[in-house]
Amino acid sequence: MNWKFTGDRPVYQQIMAAIRGAILKGELSPGKKVPSVRELAAEAQVNPNTVQRALTELEREGLLVSGGTSGRTVTQDQNILSAMREETLHELARACAEQFMVFGLTPRQAAQLLLALEEEKEES
Amino acid sequence: METYALQTQGLTMRYHSTLALDGLDLALPQGKIIGLLGPNGSGKTTLIKLAAGLLTPTAGSLTVCGQPIGTESKVLVSYLPDRTYFSRQQKIRELMDIFQDFYPDFDRVRAEQMLAALGISQEARLKQLSKGNQEKVQLVLVMSRRARLYLLDEPIGGVDPAARDYILNTIITNYDPSATVVISTHLIADVERVLDEFLFLYQGKVVRQGIADEVRGETGKSLDELFREVFKCLPNC
């Protein structure tokens, strides 16, 4: 998983985003066991309480399922997984659009630039 | 009533004409990693030494897990001083013998495992090790106790970034989640990811305190940035 943290946002939210990303990328597949709080804390070099909070929040969202003493697993509920995917991509698009807006570009103009990128790729 | 890992009331410490701590009222909860942050001379070491029972306050009082400072409180506290008290001639094995004699909660097996993982021989003398390894040995000893309150005075001062990572990792993977760790430092950027809560100390007073993640969420700033901002406008920093 990608553990790079910035100081401008709560660390637990950044851990949640990293775990969502790992699920979207297939590093953590549905039904698979999630590393323990201690393992994640050691890997990411963050406070175990912060990891605990991130996992609890993801559990509340339904993305992770608590298995009691056997630890947490990624949900196999396709509705929850596709909703998460949609939300994450939507969030990415919004953040991207905001960056273009800084330079006075509308989302439509930005989309044209993205399309041009695809054409470039096809040519080369 | 909640029992705090460390609680102080009107805690004051004066060295001759210098006021090191100025009527400090603190209540540090159990089960947290707490950053004691402040510029040099702000009172960090004095507070830690008082909690470790090495100094007697000029005024005010303090308790560790509800115990007044004394023999009972010292059993609960594992203290890493900012300067070593070991003889540099001693072998690592001898240091472990001392810890085992002194502290019933010392987990020697655990300490030996951590030293083996570091590749440090127990037959080595402290003076033969690099500065980074000397710091690591002391931290391993301190964190191998099953204490209720760990007081770490500048655990990452003067070591390279890789050693810093090792030290922080040792702290987060070895403490019992119901115990409290107080880390004093002015290297905020390096420790802030491991902190639950923080205190900014300045001229013996708390100028700001809070929960690290809440402050990042509310201000959009890292603790390091916040620290620079708070202390920029204060004189004599």
Image (tube, coloured by chain):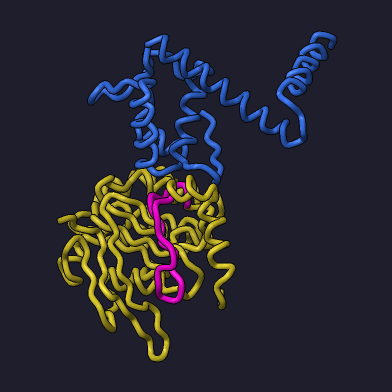
Chain colours: A blue, B yellow
Question: On screen, B77 above or below B19?
Answer: above
Image vertical order of residue A39 relative to residue B45, above or below: above
Q: Is residue A121 left or right of residue B88?
A: right
Say whether residue B14 is left or right of residue B227. left
Judge whether residue B33 is colored magenta.
no
Q: Residue at x 28, y 84 (%)?
A: B58
Q: Is residue B205 magenta?
A: yes
Percent from the top left, x then y, of residue B222?
53, 51
Which quadrant would the C terminus of chain B be assigned to in this image? bottom right
Quarter containing the N terminus of chain B? bottom left
Q: Residue at x 41, y 10 (%)?
A: A79
Q: Is residue B23 visible?
A: yes
Measuring from the top left, give residue B52's x and y in whole percent: 28, 69
Q: Residue B160: give x, y in percent of width and height.
A: 56, 54
Residue that appears at 51% across and 57% down: B188
**Highlighted magenta segment, given as a residue range:** B192-212
Most foreground residue, B3 or A103: A103
Which quarter of the figure has residue B6? Answer: bottom left
Determine the residue located farthest toward the bottom in the rendered image: B16
Instruction: From the top left corner, tell me how far across and down residue B67 is, in percent.
Output: 16, 65
A103 vs A31, nearest the viewer: A103
Overall secondary structure of the magenta section: strand
- Residue at position x 67%, y 28% in the image: A97
Residue B158 lies, with reference to residue B17, above or below; the image says above
